[in-house]
Image (spheres, rainbow, N blue to C red):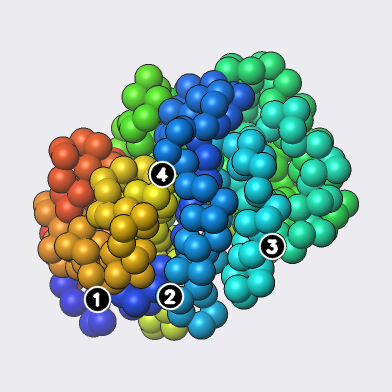
Amino acid sequence: MHPESHGPAIPTALSFDRAPQRVYWEITRACSLACRHCRAEASPRPDEGELSPAEGRALLEQIARFSDPPPKVILTGGDPLERADLFDLIAHARSLGMGVSVSPSATPRLTSEVVFNLANAGVEAISLSLDGATAEHHDALRGVPGCFDRTLVAARAAANARLMVQVNTLACAETLDDLLAIYALVSELHVARWSLFFLVTVGRGTVLQQLDPEMVERLLSWLADLPRDRPPVVTTTEAPQFRRVQLEKRRLVQAPSPRAGFGVRDGNGVMFISNTGEVSPSGFLPVAAGNVRNEDPVTIYRSSSLFTSLRDAQGFGGRCGACSFHAICGGSRARAWAATGDPLGEDPLCPYEPLVAEATAS
């Protein structure tokens, strides 16, 4: 079927071939938590090869050359608060015109004072994790008692400091039954955004169980039905098929203008830089396309074969390549890689059968 003539119109995706929308920089792998699903496989001490303060400032200057305005930078980890020059890096990024967000871990370092200092430093948002609606459930996944309570304290401190908060929640078999209660808690905290991270079995995430495709589809349908006239805004990570579900729910009859998130996926609008400078499409797709110590990250993003292939959705394998939603969705490239070793393969967590569904609709 041709989407422009049958069924709900499919909006076009924005182009991210020249610059990513967001750059995630893992400034350290040091973290005092022991989360069961940690992508970074964080440890109590930083890697010996971690980018130095001078290398970090130079990296920010390279990122700023992508575009005007430059991409937003998310300082992540490990725990960014473990890095002594965190506030210097924030100040340097802000001086280069970058929007900066920080993803701290809920350790004793994350005090209300630190939250206020982040706000005063010009940080646009912080992300906090809630993988359970109670301390018992959340702390069991995080590996250290007290994380749940510290997360709530930080969220309320951010509200007082007028600092935007995104709450991240892992979507997997172990958290599924708690998601409704987590949503209620997130709504009560008045955070701006709730992002569900659909498990990709990389790092320590291999010890947890993914949802099956049919359950993912039901979960995405439930998320699409949540109220849209009040916070939090609901988003997903590594489940771009949420865009298809939303469009099908709304039965669009005329294509709207491109939306900021349409088409964003690993390597297309997103770039990840490890603590040692390796550049990959995302933190969940740890395939290096180069290293900032000896290559320009702008050139890596724009010209490396890995990144350019990930921006060509028509070249994806299986159902992802055949699907008429591939431009705005494209499936999780990280999950395709984790399942098959091929980042251009089919996303096994999506049950949508495009050829059958589109033939029926036409």
Badge 4 is on which residue?
Answer: 276
Q: Where is residue 70 in the image (x, y as percent from the top left)?
A: 51, 75
Q: Name the residue under label 2.
A: 66
Q: Which residue matches tag 1?
A: 3
In-front residue for pair 32/283: 32
For the residues labelled 3 and 2, the Cα–Cα distance comes to 19 Å
Q: Which amino acid does label 3 sit on?
A: Ala
Disc 1 versus disc 3: distance between alpha carbons? 46 Å
Tell me the residue that label 3 is attached to. Answer: 91
Which badge, 1 or 2, is on the more N-terminal residue?
1
Assign a secondary structure to mark 1. loop
Q: How far apart are marks 4 and 3 (CA)?
A: 21 Å
- Pointer 2 local density, CA inside 10 Å: few below 14, some 14–19, many at least 20: some
> Which numbered disc, 1 or 3, marks the residue closer to the eye?
3
Q: What residue type is labelled 4?
A: Thr
* Mark 4 vs mark 1, CA separation in Å: 44 Å
Q: In which quarter of the image is the C terminus?
A: bottom left
The local secondary structure at tag 2 comes to loop
Q: Which of marks 4 and 3 is nearer the N terminus?
A: 3
* Contact flag, marks 4 and 3 (Cβ < 8 Å): no
Q: Residues within 10 Å of mark 1 (few under 14, many from 20)?
A: some
Name the mark nearer the viewer: 3 or 2: 3
Mark 2–mark 4 Cα distance, whole angstroms, equals 21 Å
